Image: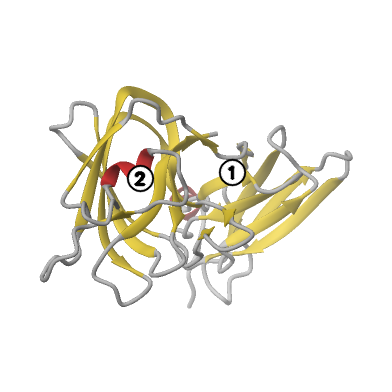
Amino acid sequence: VGNVYGANYQRSILIRPVNVASVIGKDSARIDWGAVSYKEGVSSELSYTDLSGNYHERVISSDTTSTLLPNVNATTSFTYRTKYLPSPLAIDSFYTAYKTVKIKGAPFEVGKSGWTITASSEDVSGNRRAVNLIDGNKTNLYVNQIVSGNTYPHWTIVDMKAVITDVEGFYFYQRSTNPLKTLEIQISNNGTDWETLGDFVLANTPTVNTGSPQTAKPVYADLSRPRSFRYFKQIYKNDHGNSVNVNIHETGVFTR
């Protein structure tokens, strides 16, 4: 007694998605993998040629969430396929068709001149207004109004004054204390009809150190595909601390 796997099973399997493959640092890239569609997908086979002309082959386990490729840049592409084993006792493995993915360039922060912003509330007395989020100054803050009962969620809406095309995601310069954790992002072209892009969880890596020397690095919320829009709404739901107040230095959109 046994099972036979053939053409029908072959047609049902899907290649493991790549969420984003982009340059990081100098001459290196990171592939962030999506979830494999079925538990029988055991690995992906990846190949690429580096900047020195050397050919590489890698086997990436399905429980690996990210893969680093050294000695590559935004001119590099890689090819991969996903391997399926329908049963631990199966004689043969099945493979998806090959797919080629081009590595994207480093994030480029879109300029914010002329942008306007509104908020659910803001700390006016402390001069920690919502406009601080889009003024390009990484030392001041946006904080919601500090009054009893004013807790998460908080929100801001940004009007970029024109449709920005091929947006790859959002960046945040976080405070070292209680950095933002979860937010929902919505987009619109008219400021009335909104499309939600879902919830995003930011890494617990505070990016602005106001001591000496001062350093500033963004954290990113990558989109599953490039989008074009004029307005974006960020709904802040919680942070990595015990605060009820949102506090962020800067936010904006990036392309590649």
* Image quadrant in which you'd find residue 236: bottom left
- As helix, strand or loop, the secondary structure at mark 2 comes to helix
Q: Amino acid at mark 2?
A: Leu
Please give left or right for residue 54 compared with residue 110 in the image.
right
| Quadrant position of the C terminus in the picture | top right
Q: Helix, strand, or loop for circle 1?
A: loop
Residue 21 x, y percent position in the rendering: 59, 45
Q: Residue pushed farthest left? A: 149
Q: Residue at x 43, y 33 (%)?
A: 167
Viewer-side residue, 159 vs 212: 212
Residue 69 appears at what percent x and percent y?
A: 73, 52
Q: Which badge, 1 or 2, is on the more N-terminal residue?
A: 1
The answer to whether residue 43 shows anywhere in this view is no
Q: Amino acid at mark 1?
A: Ala
Viewer-proximal residue among 51 and 85: 51
- In the depicted structure, whether residue 245 falls above or below residue 124: below
Q: Is residue 164 above or below residue 108?
A: above
In this rendering, which labeled residue sits more in front, label 1 or label 2? 2
Dot 1 crowding, Cα within 10 Å, few <14, some 14–19, many 20+ = few
Q: Gap between marks 1 and 2, in whole Å?
A: 45 Å
| In this rendering, position of residue 222 left or right of residue 238 | right
Q: Which residue is mark 1?
A: 97
Residue projecting furthest to the top: 162
Is residue 82 shown left or right of residue 198?
right
Q: Does residue 162 lie above or below 232 as drawn?
A: above
Where residue 49 appears, as percent x and y from the top left, is 80, 41
Residue 134, label in figure = none
Which residue carries the number 2 mark?
A: 133
> Residue at 16% of width from left, 50% of height from top?
120
Residue at image point 83% right, 39% down: 51
Residue 154 x, y percent position in the rendering:
20, 57
Against 158, residue 185 (above or below) is below
